[in-house]
Amino acid sequence: MAYLIMLGGLFLGLIFFTFVFIVSKRNGNYYLAPMVTFLFSLLIVVYSIFFVGGFEGMGYLFIAGGFLTISVIGTLLLPIITRRIKSQQLHKGDKISLVVLPILFFAIIGLTIYSDDGYWIIAQASAAPIETEGYRISTISEGKKEITILLGEEYLGKEIQVEDVSKWGSTEITLKLIGEGVDGKVPFIQIGIDEIKEPLKVQTTDGVVFEEIGSSGN
C-alpha cells in the first residue's frame, strides 16, 4: 500500500513540476520548477505532522516523498532539459498543458478522496453467541471510532461481511450475513471508522436494525 501511495506522490509531483517548469519558460528561471516542488513537499510534511498526525499522516509523508524525489531528479536533469529548449516562448502544446495539468492534478486528488472508504476491518472472527445482541462504540487513536457488532444465537453458523458504509449524510453501516461461518458460533466483527455522523444506523441487507448495547433502545 505504501508503494502505491509513493507512486501516486511521484505522479502528482511530476505533474506539479511540469506545470511550474512550463510557467518558468517565459523568464527562463527554470530552477523554480525543482525549487517550488521541493517547497511544496515541505508544506505537505508540515500538514501531515501538525494538522493530520498519527497513522493517517504517514500517507501524506509518502506523497511528500514523491514530490521530493521529483524535485531531486528534476534538479539533476535540469541542465539536460534546458539545453534542448530553443525558445522561451510558449507554444501551443505548452498552453494546452497549462490547462490540462491542473485539471489532471486536482482530478486525481478528488478521485482519491472519493474512493476512500473511510472505514477498515480491525478484527473479524467467530465467537460464542451473546444474550443481548447489538453494537458497541469506542474511541481509538486520533478520535476515530471502533464499532463492535455482537450477535445472538439466531446467527449461528453465519459469516458477516461489510456491504456498505455511507459516506454522505448520517452514518449507515450495512452488513451482509451469509451461511458460510463456523458451526456453533456466530460472526464477530470490529470496524474502524474515520467519523460517525449521527444518527448512526447499523443494519443488515435483510433490513434488520441493530441497537447500541446499553442504550435505552435495548
Image (spheres, rainbow, N blue to C red):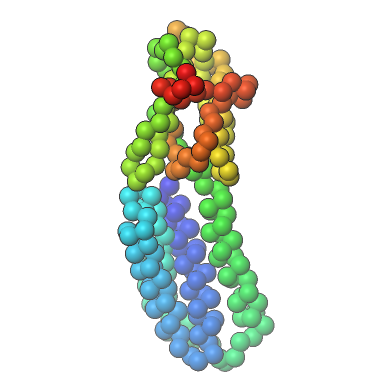
Q: In this view, does 216 lie above or below 199?
A: above
Q: In this view, does 209 lie to the left or right of 130?
A: right
Q: In this view, does 176 lie to the left or right of 150?
A: right
The answer to whether residue 188 of the structure is visible from this angle is no
The answer to whether residue 215 of the structure is visible from this angle is yes
Q: Residue at x 54, y 90 (%)?
A: 26
Q: In this view, does 10 lie above or below 129?
A: below
The x, y position of residue 166, in whole percent, is 57, 39
Task: Report the label total.
Answer: 0
Q: Looking at this view, name the residue that lies furthest to the top.
A: 184
Q: Which residue is drawn at 39% across and 64% down?
A: 44
- Residue closer to the observer: 147 or 70: 147
Q: In this view, does 14 lie above or below 60?
A: below
The x, y position of residue 39, in whole percent, is 38, 74
Q: Residue at x 47, y 18 (%)?
A: 218
- Residue closer to the observer: 104 or 217: 217
The x, y position of residue 101, in whole percent, is 58, 70
Q: Residue at x 55, y 48 (%)?
A: 115
Q: Quadrant of residue 108?
A: bottom right
Q: Is residue 88 left or right of residue 196?
A: right
The x, y position of residue 14, in whole percent, is 49, 69
- Residue closer to the observer: 210 or 188: 210
Q: Is residue 87 above or below residue 57?
A: below
Q: In which quarter of the image is residue 100?
A: bottom right
